[in-house]
Image (cartoon, helix red, strand yellow):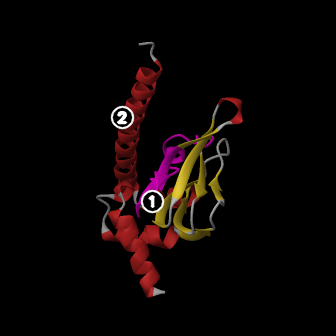
Amino acid sequence: MEAEIDARSTLLRDSPLFRSLEGAEINRLVELSEIQEYSPGETVVVEGSMGDAIFLLYDGELSVHILGTGGRDITLAQVNSQGAFFGEVALADPGPRSATVRADGESVLLMLSLEALEVFFGEFADAQVVILRNIARALAQRLRESNVLVASIASDSSPA
């Protein structure tokens, strides 16, 4: 049990989402978190469903998909680095999920429900600013990457 707690602490401490949090804050997040396991092909979250949790990859590989025109499944990203996170938009702006996430192999995730995070922010109010700043950084990086992709697609489809 202690090894699992240490592993969760390390995962949270090393994740860009929780960068700059103190030991007591990390320890409380460990207490509030849940481990979830997924088999290959299993869906973690569904595009359009209400976002109610943030997930961090502990082990495995996931893929992020959206439903394109005509029902075509479009893969947006692969998630395979420990500590990578998704679902953070729900914390900043509760609403429907913008993509579906599926396990590509046996995967282990650390899940923090929005309800648990509200408890955490009630106890560590200053941590909310730190986490939201980290989310803003991650979203800005993802936007930059999306802009590059859109520019690439646009230039590939331009008449010569």
**Residue at image mark 2:** 144
At 39% from the left and 79% from the top, the residue drawn is: 6
Q: Amino acid at mark 1?
A: Asn
Whichever of callouts 2 and 1 sits on the residue coming sooner in the sequence is 1
Which stretch is magenta? 76-98
Spatial CA span between label 2 and label 1:
20 Å
Q: Nearer the viewer, mark 2 or mark 1?
A: 1
- Crowding around mark 1 (Cα neighbors within 10 Å: few <14, some 14 to 19, many 20+) is some
- Crowding around mark 2 (Cα neighbors within 10 Å: few <14, some 14 to 19, many 20+) is few
Q: Which mark is residue 80?
A: 1
Q: Residue 140 placed where, x, y %? A: 36, 38
Q: Residue 73 placed where, x, y %? A: 64, 41
Helix, strand or loop at label 2? It is helix
Is residue 90 located in the magenta-colored stretch of the structure?
yes
Dividing the picture into quadrants, the one containing residue 124 is bottom left
Is the residue under label 1 in contact with that under label 2 (CB below 8 Å)? Answer: no
* Rendered view: 137 above or below 21: above
Among all residues in the image, which is located at the extreme top?
Answer: 159
Figure quadrant of the C terminus: top left
135 displayed left or right of 48 = left
Does any portion of residue 95 appear in the rendered image?
no
Q: Amino acid at mark 2?
A: Arg
Return the residue nearer the eye: 105 or 54: 105
